[in-house]
Amino acid sequence: MNWAFSTLGLPDAPLPEVLRLAADHGWAGVELRCAPGQPVHLGLTAAERAAAVRQFGSAGVRPLTVCSYVRIAAPGDDAAVLAELLDHVRLAADLGAPYVRVFPRGDDATAVRRLAAAAPEAARLGVRVLIETHDTHRAGADVARIAEAVDSPAVGGLWDLLHTWLAGESPAASYAALAPRLGYVQIKDVASPDDLTPLPLGAGLLPIDDCLRLLPADTWVSWEYEAPWHPAAAPFAPLLARLPRLP
């Protein structure tokens, strides 16, 4: 596997510290939470984007994804959502990240229409837009349905294992649905459906091993540790000293 982690678990860490942790402990890539106050955000200047590229290159770490908070199917004007999405796509292209993460948060028809409109520019820039299994579309089958309707190589799925598990979908069913258009996989662990405080991998109930056994050896797998929403969670940085084990 190609192992990455999300900066979501390190909300106060500057990019050089994130990259030091990745390089020191053998993590090949980093998912970049894109939000105000974070090291990566839409307001970065051209010079700041170029500096980030140099930092990644020096560390030997790949910028895997610009993790946007675009709700691709949210109610409202198409133009505003498309503009926000394409701003994230351009940021990913500038940073050398192959993916942009989006959330569904609405109906299929709206998501398909907007993603189809964005796909040509994303393809031109060499960036894939990945719909995460989340909120209104927790199951792999839900996300696959949108991606198949768009029918563009620039649009695919991001398998968040927590949400397919919460939807009651088995790893085998999730993989079968998403495999033709799968970008990569996010893993995490929790104690129960009623307690989503992040835990060290293997300390909770999620079927992580069952998921990993299904994946081709060159798949990217990222640990998303949702620390900002769970103040009681253990600090993430010390947990990065050990790469996940293969089943």
Image (cartoon, rainbow, N blue to C red):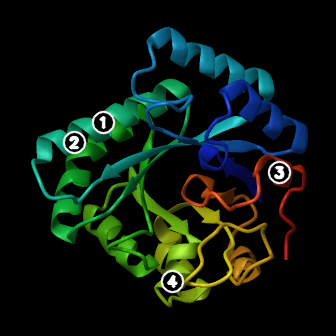
Q: Residues within 10 Å of mark 4 (few under 14, many from 20)?
A: some
Type of the residue with mark 2: Leu
Q: Please state which of the two labelled residues, at mark 4 or mark 1, is closer to the viewer.
A: 4
Q: Residues within 10 Å of mark 3 (few under 14, many from 20)?
A: some
Q: Which residue is mark 4?
A: 166
Q: Which residue is mark 3?
A: 240
Mark 2 or mark 3: name the one nearer the start of the chain.
2
Q: Please state which of the two labelled residues, at mark 2 or mark 3, is closer to the viewer.
A: 3
Type of the residue with mark 3: Leu
The tag on residue 82 is 2
Determine which quarter of the picture holds residue 87.
Answer: top left
Residue 23 locus on image (x, y percent): 84, 35
State how many labels appear.
Answer: 4
Q: How far is the residue under mark 3 from the one under mark 1?
A: 32 Å
Looking at the image, which is closer to me, 38 or 62?
A: 38
Q: Please state which of the two labelled residues, at mark 2 or mark 4, is closer to the viewer.
A: 4
Q: Residues within 10 Å of mark 1 (few under 14, many from 20)?
A: some
Say what secondary structure mark 1 lies in: helix
Looking at the image, which is closer to me, 122 or 163?
A: 163
Residue 219 locus on image (x, y percent): 68, 60
Residue 230 locus on image (x, y percent): 60, 61
Mark 2 or mark 4: name the one nearer the start of the chain.
2
Q: Is residue 69 left or right of residue 98?
A: left
Say what secondary structure mark 2 lies in: helix
What residue is at 29 percent from the left and 46 percent from the top? Answer: 119
